[in-house]
Structure formats: structure tokens, C-alpha cells
């Protein structure tokens, strides 16, 4: 954020009227005392008292005119470190003010606008900034609620040496702080039906394919000339080479149930926030293991990962971009008005095979049957069923607990690795339990 803020350069009609409105309590008191002294001098016939009254009344007016006509050229900038933080963590905001004029500034007060969830509005007083000088101040912000929060614009308040008048100037630029869900590192377990992110079984050699099946690409410096595909070169008019092999990344879909009817309560300790945090932790964990991850919600909306990335450094770069995109999406995700998971079921039915990890809220009988049919015959499917009622006062009812256990058992019979989630449960421990249950399921098959 950078901008120029010339003090007293307001050329709008009524600019001086705005400056008069900025007189402080001290300035108004001096003006009132001057008028009173002038009135008393007229009544009492005291010329000396009139001079005192004129001096008292003129001082704040002179300060207003002087401050209004004073032209400071200052530039302000803001730096966020970092611009994306997990919920509950702090970010540092550094403000810098540069005086680009040939005059020293007077007393300045800086105030940065921040949303109330990030803490109190920061204020700083700068006594004097010399010509071509700079000042740097910093403050910290923190939020337990995920979201995207604007910071700014930065406001600068000018005052005269006598404190008779104050003028406020605002910079136009602002920055955005993104508060993403909390994530936890997950243990590297092996799940039944899961394949590694990269592997020999996932590669196919195109050199063995027929000429019509070759997928060429543009020649790059260093390519072996023996790989030049002359038919494609003649067709496209530029040198083309064969791809020797096309790696395929193992896929993982993270399903997040956002239905409003599936969760009770709100706030950082609610069941919905646990599900969002779990989805973020799972997505990052699978991306670190070189999976092509897709984030899917109950509405059918999806955020694809780096599914077409190649190996080497490019894959890590694409995975980092995919992680940032998913975290930004989860930072602002909210409840949906959907009543069931049919939209997500349609997407999964037409999608590719792979690992499925679902974070699901409260289900009715029809929806749990739909979830049971989501599991594919190949690949693993893991479901974390949140006992949403347990996060509220209604969680003490035994029928609700028995109903959740019946739903978990139904999903297990359908081939899912299903685990109930209650307040206080941590995802890393549940992840290990999922490994044990998946191995038991594999042994039973």
C-alpha cells in the first residue's frame, strides 16, 4: 500500500469549512473565551480587554488556516507478515511513513482501520518527521475466526503545535489478511485400497504406443533429437517431440459436508469448525504425499488440486499452489442450504477413482443410505461422522448416541472406514484408528 497524502491540499468547495469543523475542544474554548472577552470589553469599555479577546479568538483561527494551507507530502505503506495465518495465530503489520516534502511535519497520529475481530484499532503518535525522513511502527493482529479481513485504509491525523485544530487524511489502499482453518499434521499411515501418490504402476510408456496414439509436445532445449516426432512437426510447423512417459497422480477427494441442518452451534469450538479444520488437515496431508487432491462440498462445488502436475520441482510448486487455493477456499466457506448430499453424490458418481475422505455432519436415514452408496469398489473410503448434537446440550440424549453408532455400523457394512467424532477428539488419533479399521476390513475381505 502506497499513496500520497498532501495535508491541507483539499481543494473541494467548503475545504476551509471542513478544517474549521476540525477545531479541538481547546480551540473552541479559546474562540469562545475571545468572543466573551470582546463582549465584556464593549460592555465595560475596556480597550485592553478587547485586545486580549481578539488575540484569544484569532489564535485558533490562525491555526486552522495555517494547518489547512500547510502542504505535507507523505507516503504510507503497509506490510503483512504473513498474509495468510491459521486461526489463533498472530500476524505482524508494519506501517511505514515517508515524508517526501521539504518541510518537517508537525505532530501526527496514525490510525489503521482493522475489523473488531482482529483486536483494538491501533494508534501511533509521531512527534516530528524531518524532510525526506521516515518512521516505522508495527502492531499485531490475531483472530480465532477464519475469514478474509481488510486492513486499512490508513488514516493520518494532523494537528498544529498548540493543539487548536486536527485534520484527518486517509490513504486509499488497503490489504487483506486471510485467516485459514487450523491444521494438524497427520501420521503417515497406510490405508486399505490406497495407492502411493507416484509409482511405477501409475506410469504408462507412450513410446510403446502406435504412431496415432502419441501425444507430442513442443521441443525444449536439451531434448534428445531421437525423440522428434516428424509427423507432428510437419503438421504444426514447429519441432515436436514424443513424451516418453506420462505419469498419473493418485487421486484423493476430500468431501466436506457444509449443510446447516447437519450441525449445531457456531464459533471456533463448534462441530462445523472441527470439520473444516479436519478437511484442511487432510488436504494438506495428501498433497504432501504427492496426491492430486480435490476438495468437494455437499453442493457439488469442487476445488481441484494439481492433477496434471508432472514430477520433480514442478509438482511441488503446483501442490503448494493447490494447498493455498484450498486453504483460501476453506477460510471463507460457510453453511449451505442443502438438505442432503445428492449433489456431491452425482459428482462422485461421474468422477475418477481414488481415495475418498468425508467429514459429515448429522444424517437422516435417507442421507446415510446415500452416503453408503458413495463408496467406490476400488480405493478406500473414510468417513468421519461428527456427533454434532454432542457439541450442544442435546448431546446427552442416549437415542442420539445409539443412532450415530447405527449409522457408523451401516457405513462399515457398505465398505467404509467409518469413525464417530465427538468433542475433544483429535484428528491424528482418529487417523490412526482409521488405519487399524481399514486393515481389519482388508483382512476380512
Image (cartoon, rainbow, N blue to C red):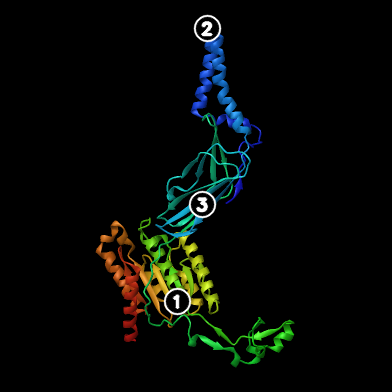
Q: Which mark is residue 150?
A: 3
Side of 119 where 168 appears, left or right: right
Within-10-Å neighbours for mark 2: few <14, some 14–19, many 20+: few
Within-10-Å neighbours for mark 3: few <14, some 14–19, many 20+: few
Residue under the image location 46 percent in, 56 percent down: 147
Q: Which is more N-terminal, label 3 or label 2? A: 2
Which element carries disc 2, helix, strand or loop?
Answer: helix
Identify whether 49 is placed above or below 169: above
Residue under the image location 50 percent in, 23 percent down: 29
Q: How far apart, in angstroms, are the residues tagged by discs 1 and 2?
A: 92 Å
* Label 1 with label 2: CB-CB less than 8 Å: no
Side of 352 where 400 appears, left or right: left
From where the camera sits, is residue 410 visible?
A: no
Q: Which is more N-terminal, label 2 or label 1? A: 2
Side of 227 where 348 appears, left or right: left
Identify the residue position indicated by label 2 in the image.
44
Amino acid at each position: 500500500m502506497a499513496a500520497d497524502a498532501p495535508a491541507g491540499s483539499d481543494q473541494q468547495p467548503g475545504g476551509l469549512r471542513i478544517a474549521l469543523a476540525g477545531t479541538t475542544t481547546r480551540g473552541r474554548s479559546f474562540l469562545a473565551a475571545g468572543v466573551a472577552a470582546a463582549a465584556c470589553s464593549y460592555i465595560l469599555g475596556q480597550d485592553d480587554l478587547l485586545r486580549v479577546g481578539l488575540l484569544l479568538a484569532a489564535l485558533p483561527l490562525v491555526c486552522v488556516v495555517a494547518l489547512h494551507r500547510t502542504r505535507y507530502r507523505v507516503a504510507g505503506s503497509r506490510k503483512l507478515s504473513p498474509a495468510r495465518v491459521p486461526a489463533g495465530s498472530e500476524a505482524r503489520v508494519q506501517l511505514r511513513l515517508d515524508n517526501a516534502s521539504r518541510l518537517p511535519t508537525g505532530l501526527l497520529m496514525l490510525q489503521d482501520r482493522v475489523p473488531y475481530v482482529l483486536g483494538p484499532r491501533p494508534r501511533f503518535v509521531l512527534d516530528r518527521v524531518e524532510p525526506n525522513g521516515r518512521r516505522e511502527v508495527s502492531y499485531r493482529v490475531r483472530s480465532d475466526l477464519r475469514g478474509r479481513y481488510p486492513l486499512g485504509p490508513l488514516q493520518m491525523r494532523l494537528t498544529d503545535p498548540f493543539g487548536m485544530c486536527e485534520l484527518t487524511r486517509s490513504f486509499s489502499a488497503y490489504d487483506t489478511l486471510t485467516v485459514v482453518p487450523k491444521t494438524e499434521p497427520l501420521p503417515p499411515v497406510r490405508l486399505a485400497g490406497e495407492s502411493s501418490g507416484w509409482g511405477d504402476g501409475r506410469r504408462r510408456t507412450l513410446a510403446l504406443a502406435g504412431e496415432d496414439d502419441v501425444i507430442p509436445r513442443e521441443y525444449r532445449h536439451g531434448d534428445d533429437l531421437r525423440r522428434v516426432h516428424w509427423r507432428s512437426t510437419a503438421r504444426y510447423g514447429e519441432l515436436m517431440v514424443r513424451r516418453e512417459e506420462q505419469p498419473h497422480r493418485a487421486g484423493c477427494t476430500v468431501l466436506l459436508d457444509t449443510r446447516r441442518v447437519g450441525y449445531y452451534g457456531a464459533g471456533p469450538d463448534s462441530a462445523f469448525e472441527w470439520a473444516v479444520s479436519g478437511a484442511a488437515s487432510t488436504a494438506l496431508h495428501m498433497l504432501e504425499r504427492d496426491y492430486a487432491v480435490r476438495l468437494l462440498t455437499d453442493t457439488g462445488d469442487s476445488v481441484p488440486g494439481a492433477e496434471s502436475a508432472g514430477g520433480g520441482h514442478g509438482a511441488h510448486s503446483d501442490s503448494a499452489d493447490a494447498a493455498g487455493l484450498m486453504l483460501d477456499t476453506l477460510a471463507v466457506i460457510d453453511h449451505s442450504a442443502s438438505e442432503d448430499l445428492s449433489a456431491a453424490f452425482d459428482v462422485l458418481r461421474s468422477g475418477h477413482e481414488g481415495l475418498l475422505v468425508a467429514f459429515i455432519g448429522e444424517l437422516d436415514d435417507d442421507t446415510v443410505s446415500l452416503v453408503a452408496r458413495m463408496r467406490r469398489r476400488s480405493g478406500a473410503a473414510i468417513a468421519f461422522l461428527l456427533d454434532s448434537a454432542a457439541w450442544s446440550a442435546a448431546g446427552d440424549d442416549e437415542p442420539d448416541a445409539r443412532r450415530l453408532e447405527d449409522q457408523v455400523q451401516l457405513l462399515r457394512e457398505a465398505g467404509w472406514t467409518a469413525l464417530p467424532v465427538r468433542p475433544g477428539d483429535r484428528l491424528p488419533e482418529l487417523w490412526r484408528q482409521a488405519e487399524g479399521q481399514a486393515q481389519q476390513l482388508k483382512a476380512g475381505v
